[in-house]
Amino acid sequence: MLGTVQSAPALAQDESVDVTFIIYTAAGDPFWDPVITGAKEAAADRGVNLDIQYGDSDPVKQNNLLETAITNGVDGIAVVNYLPDAFTDNIAKARAAGIGVVTFDTDDPRPGATESQAYVGQDFFAAGQRIAKRMIEAGKLKSGDHVVAPVEDPDAFYGTERYRGIKAVLDEAGITSERLDASPTMATALTRISQYLVGNQNTKAVIGLGSVVTEVAPQAAKEAGVEIAVGGFDLSPGIIDAILGGSMVATVDSGAYYEGYMPVVMLHYYAKYGIPPSSIPIGGTVIDASNAELVKEFAGTYR
């Protein structure tokens, strides 16, 4: 991340901090429930005025939300930077106006690509390597086997970087792989994965690159009439139930609660005291049958 453009404005101790929190998808996606829980709890803890907005997976709309936040003179912006160069200019405008900016969940992996001050989220490449190794072990994958990696948004950083990590491990083992555009809609993703498996009978494993595709993958394999290893990323009650029920090997935790909590806390302290936000690598824990029960109680809320 680049250094700060301007010092944070010094707010009086009785002034509250205004933070705009921009989620890039539409409202109602259960993946974001723990993120929202974290953001709201941080706002309550620090007395922050929190405004949660949704970009509806539309970069034009998300840029409009950023511009509105800048015009309104908020003290901080937390935003998912999910597409190459799509939000760079408005992040720079916010920083030039003295507004703190923290990216969460997804950010450009290139060092110094934007003027955001910090990133709270997963190292996608390393997480990809981790799940690939687990899937090779659990699925007894060998040279010559094939793996499909479906993703909701083929251009988003989380998918490209997770797959890059997965592919690096699979390539080294002589295992071929392919990334599949499966859409963020559960019904469509289910159909596309199932059709792929029917048409590619040599596929030995599915590794979903996001929460939607991971959740529907076991059902897709069932509908395709194949018994293969299934794994992926993120947590939800459905994903945890699939692991406990034996239809999924493992998933990688994204640390969603902290993705919500930590940006709000850091933006508060930056606005009040000029303490610059700091990047926090979170997530990356592999959840499988050995530890899924520990997660189940809080899946969809804090996990």
Image (cartoon, rainbow, N blue to C red):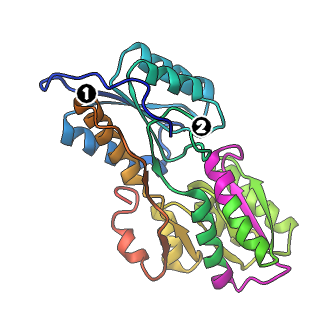
Residue at coordinates 36% horizontally, 74% vertically from top-left? 294
Label annotation for residue 218: none
Residue at coordinates 31% horizontally, 40% vertically from top-left? 266
Magenta highlight on residue 102 = no
- Judged from this view, the residue extending furthest toward the top is 71
Residue at coordinates 45% horizontally, 20% vertically from top-left? 96
Residue 227 in percent (x, y) is at: 72, 80
Residue labelled with disc 1: 17
Nearest to the observer: residue 246 or residue 168: 168
Residue labelled with disc 2: 113
Residue 127 lies in what quarter of the image?
Answer: bottom right
Residue 296 lies in what quarter of the image?
Answer: bottom left
Magenta highlight on residue 139 = yes
**Residue type at the position of mark 1:** Val
Q: Which residues are magenta?
A: 136-163
Query: First in sequence: mark 1 or mark 2?
Result: 1
- Residue 159 showing in the rendered view: yes
Residue at coordinates 49% horizontally, 47% vertically from top-left? 105
- Judged from this view, the residue extending furthest toward the left is 14
Instruction: Classify mark 1: residues with Cα within 10 Å, few (<14), some (14-19) or many (20+).
Output: many
Is 55 rendered above or below residue 296? above
Where is the C terminus found, in terms of image quarters? bottom left
Is 68 rendered above or below residue 233? above
Residue 207 in percent (x, y) is at: 67, 66
Distance between mark 1 and mark 2 Cα atoms: 27 Å
Nearest to the observer: residue 80 or residue 99: 99
Mark 1, secondary structure of its residue: loop
Mark 2, secondary structure of its residue: loop
Nearest to the observer: residue 63 or residue 246: 63
Residue 244 in percent (x, y) is at: 48, 78
**Residue type at the position of mark 2:** Ala
